[in-house]
Image: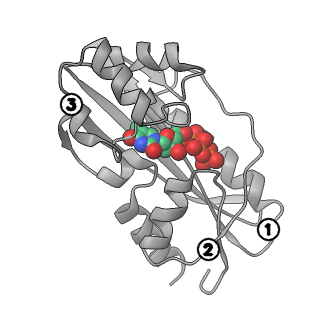
Amino acid sequence: MSGRPLVLASASPRRVELLSQAGFGHKVILPQVDEAHDASLTPEQLTVENARRKALAVSRTQPGALVIGADTLVYVDGDPLGKPADLEEALRMVRRLSGRTHEVCTGVAFACDGAVVRELHVITHVTFKPLTDELIRAYHARVNPLDKAGAYGIQECTEMLLDHMTGSFTNVVGLPVDEVAAALRELQS
Ligand SMILES: Cc1cn([C@H]2C[C@H](O)[C@@H](COP(=O)(O)OP(=O)(O)OP(=O)(O)O)O2)c(=O)[nH]c1=O
C-alpha cells in the first residue's frame, strides 16, 4: 500500500490539524453519511462502525487512495453523548460529567478501494472538577460546544473543566495520533 495518496474523510478541523502536525500530508474530503446511534453497541463497536461508514463513503470516490475515517463519542453511565443540538442540551451534557470520570472513545477506520483495511479504537478516561451551572455557562460562552461530542473541547479553556486525564489527549480531541501514525507507517510500508 506504499505511496498511496492519503485522504482524511472528515469535516473536523481538529482531525485535519492533528494529522498534519504528525507529518502526514493529506487531502480532506467531507464524508456524506448517516451516522449510527445504536446505544446498545459498545463504545468500540459504535465509533468504529461510524468511522467505517465515513472512510468507505469517501473511499468509493477516491480509487487508489488510503482513506481515514474517525468518530469520537463521550460515554457516561453507558450512554453515548454526541454533539448537542443546542445550548440547553450542551448544559445538560456537561452537568452529567461534573465531578466524575467519563470515557472518550475514538474509532478509526482505514479504507482503500471501497474496502476497510484496518480499524482501531482508543479510550481515554477524563475526570472533570465539580462544576456549577454558572461555570458551565461561562465555559460555553467561551468555547462553542455544538460541534463537539459531549459539549466540551478538552483543548480549549481546559483549566475550567479538567481535574485529570488518563490516556491519550489527542484521542479526546478527535484522533489518537500515536496509534494512527503507527498504523499508517505499517500500511504504507
Ligand atoms: C470530547 C471532544 C470532542 N471534540 C470533537 C472532535 C470531533 O470533531 C467531534 C466529535 O464528532 P465526530 O462526529 O466524531 O466528528 P465531526 O462531526 O466533528 O467530523 P467528521 O464526522 O466529519 O469527521 O468532537 C473535541 O474537539 N474536543 C473534545 O474534547
Q: Is residue 125 left or right of residue 182?
A: left
Which quadrant of the structure image shows residue 76? top left
Q: Is residue 46 left or right of residue 57?
A: left
From the image, tell me which residue sits under label 2: 26
Give the residue at the far right of this rendering. Answer: 61
Name the one closer to the observer, 133 or 38: 133
Q: Can you give x and y, in whole percent of width and height, for residue 14 in the image?
A: 49, 54
Any part of residue 181 in sight: yes
Which quadrant of the structure image shows residue 124? top left
Secondary structure of residue under mark 2:
loop
Any part of residue 48 in sight: no
Image point (50%, 36%), residue name: 148
Q: Is mark 3 within 8 Å of ligand 1?
A: no
10 Å crowding of disc 2: few (<14), some (14-19), many (20+) = some
10 Å crowding of disc 1: few (<14), some (14-19), many (20+) = some
Q: Earlier in the sequence, mark 3 or mark 1?
A: 1
Secondary structure of residue under mark 1:
loop
Name the one closer to the observer, 50 or 84: 84
Q: Can you give x and y, in whole percent of width and height, for residue 155 in the image?
A: 35, 48
Which quadrant of the structure image shows residue 69? bottom right
From the image, tell me which residue sits under label 3: 127
Spatial separation of the CA atoms under disc 1 and disc 2: 13 Å
Q: Is residue 30 left or right of residue 42?
A: right
Residue 16, placed above or below residue 154: below
Secondary structure of residue under mark 3:
strand
